[in-house]
Amino acid sequence: TDDGKEVKSCLICGDRATGLHYGIISCEGCKGFFKRSICNKRVYRCTRSKNCVMSRKQRNRCQFCRLLKCLQMGMNRKAIREDGMPGGRNKSIGPVQISNEEIERILSGKDFEEEAAREEQQQQQQQMEQVNNAYASIGHTGYVPLFSPGSGPQFPPNMMSSNSGSPPLNNGMRSAPTSASMNPRSLLAGGNSQMGYMPSMQGMAARERSPESGSELTSSALVEQLVLAEDCSYLSSIGAEHGFDELTISKLFSVLCKVADEMLYRQIVWIKKLPFFETISIKDHTTLLSTTWAEIILLASLCVHEDQLFGDLADITSKYLPDSEELSRFTDYEMEILERMTYLYQKFTHLKIDKEEYVIMKVINFLNQDIKGLQEVERVEEINKRYWYACQRFTELRAMERNAGRSNGSPNSTASGASRFRDLMLCLPEIRYVAGKMLNTDVTKLPLLFKAILHTCK
C-alpha cells in the first residue's frame, strides 16, 4: 500500500494499475496498447508458441501475446470511443468474455475485414436512402434506381429481352421490377438470342492464352471483337427535351436519370457480348460491373457520347437556372470535381482517342482483379494480363504501321506505340478518382454540378 491506499496491479502485465480501462483493471501502457491495436486494426505475429510471458519488463517483446491476454482477460472493444479520442465510450461497460474462436478472428484480422465490409455496406445503404429521399423530394417517387447496395445492378425483365439497343422507357420512368428480376445473377445469366453473340469469340479467346501468344493477328482480331461488342449509337434519351423553355430542377433530374439509365443499360448488353463472358462467373461479372459502372460510363461520356453530352445535353442544362440557395451550397468539393472534369475533357480532346483505344481502356479498367468480393481472382487476373499484353501489342503495331512511311521503319515507332499505350493507361486512375468523387456527391447537388461541367467543357 501507499499512504494506506491499496495498490492494484494490471491484470495484463502486473504493472501498477491506474484504474478501470475498457472493462478491466489495467495500467496506462496496456490501456494504450489495446486501444491502438483495435483502432488501427493491427494484426500481429508471434515468433514463438503463442504463450509468451507478460510482465512489465517483457510486455513489449511480443505484441501478439499481449493483445491475446488483453482479450482473454476481458478487455472490451466496445468500450473504445469510435473517434479514437481519449476517454472510454461508456464507463459502465464491464469486461466481456468471448470465445476462443472469436479471439482467433480478431488476432488474424478476419474480424476487422468483416467489420469494414459491414461499415461499407451501411454507408452504401445510407447513400441509397439519400438518393431515394432526393427522388421523392422532387417528385420522382416512381423512379427505380438501377443499383442497390451489395446486390449489383437491377433491371426489369423486359430490359434484357428488348430487341432494341436502348432501354424501354415509360414516360421516362422504369416500371417496378418483379422479385425475380431483383436477382443480379439473372441479369447476366438469362439466355437471350437477341444479344448477337459472335461465333468466333470463344476461339479467339482460346488462342490468346498467354502474353507470348499475342501476335499481330490475335491482338488485332481481339480488339476488333471488343469494338463489335460496343454500342456507339446515339443515345435516344437525349434530344426530346429541347422543347423546354425553362427547365426546373425536377425536370433536369428526370433528364439526367434517363440518360444515366440508358448508358447503364448498355453496359449490361456490352458484358454479354464480351469474348470472355462465359469464362468469368456471373457473380464476378456482377461484382466487376457494380464496382466499375460509374467509371466506364464516365469513360464513354468522354470518348463515345461527347458530342451529345457536351453539345445537346449542355444546351438542355443551359435552360436550368439555379436559385441563390442552390448556388450557395456549391462547395469546394464540387469545385474540385468541376476542375478535374475540365482537365479530363481537355486531356481526352488532346489525345484524340479513337474507338479502338476506347475499348482497350474500357476492358482493362473493367477487369480489375483488386476489386473486393471477387470469387475467382486468379482467373480475372489471368484475363486482365492477356488483354493488357494483347492491347499493348496492338497499340505498338498500329504505331509502327502509321509511322512506317514517315520513319522508314525506325525503332522509334515502337517507342511511340509504348508511349501511347502508357498515356492511355495513365488516364484510368484519374477516371476512377473523379467517378468516385461523383458517387459521393450529395445527390441534390448533381443537377447544378452537371450543368457547371457541361457548360465549362463546352
Image (cartoon, helix red, strand yellow):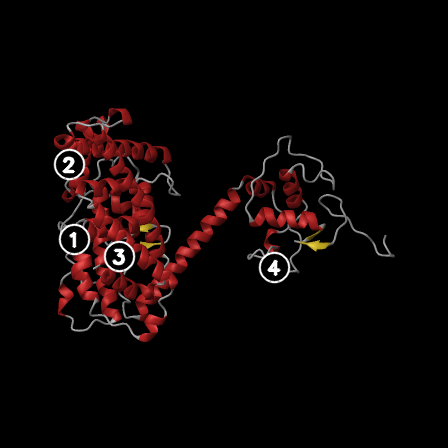
Task: Give whichever of 254, 392 is nearer the camera.
Answer: 392
Residue on which the image places disc 1: 166
Disc 4 residue crowd, few under 14, some 14–19, many 20+, Cα 10 Å: some
**Quadrant in the rendering for residue 58:** top right
Residue bearing mark 3: 177
Spot occupied by residue 313 in the image (x, y as percentages of width and height): 19, 61
- Label 2: which residue? 198
* Mark 2 / mark 4, whichever is N-terminal: 4
Residue 5 seen? yes
User: Residue 365: where, in percent of width, then height?
Assistant: 30, 42
Query: Considering depth in this image, is 392 or 159 the residue closer to the camera?
Result: 392
Gap between marks 1 and 4 measured at Cα: 53 Å
In three-dimensional space, the C-alpha distance between marks 4 and 3, rounded to whole angstroms, equals 44 Å
Q: CA distance from mark 3 to mark 1?
A: 18 Å
User: Which is nearer the N-term, disc 3 or disc 2?
Assistant: 3
| Amino acid type of the residue tagged 4 in the rendering | Arg
Q: Which residue is mark 4?
A: 89
Dot 2 and dot 1 residues touching (CB under 8 Å): no
Depth check, mark 3 against mark 2: the one in front is: 2
Outermost residue, bottom direction? 324
Q: Nearer the viewer, residue 94 or 16?
A: 16
Amino acid identity at mark 1: Ser
Residue in the picture at 19% in, 57% down: 309
- Residue type beneath disc 2: Met
Q: Which residue type does callout 3 highlight?
A: Pro
Disc 1: CA contacts within 10 A as few (<14), some (14-19) or many (>=20): many
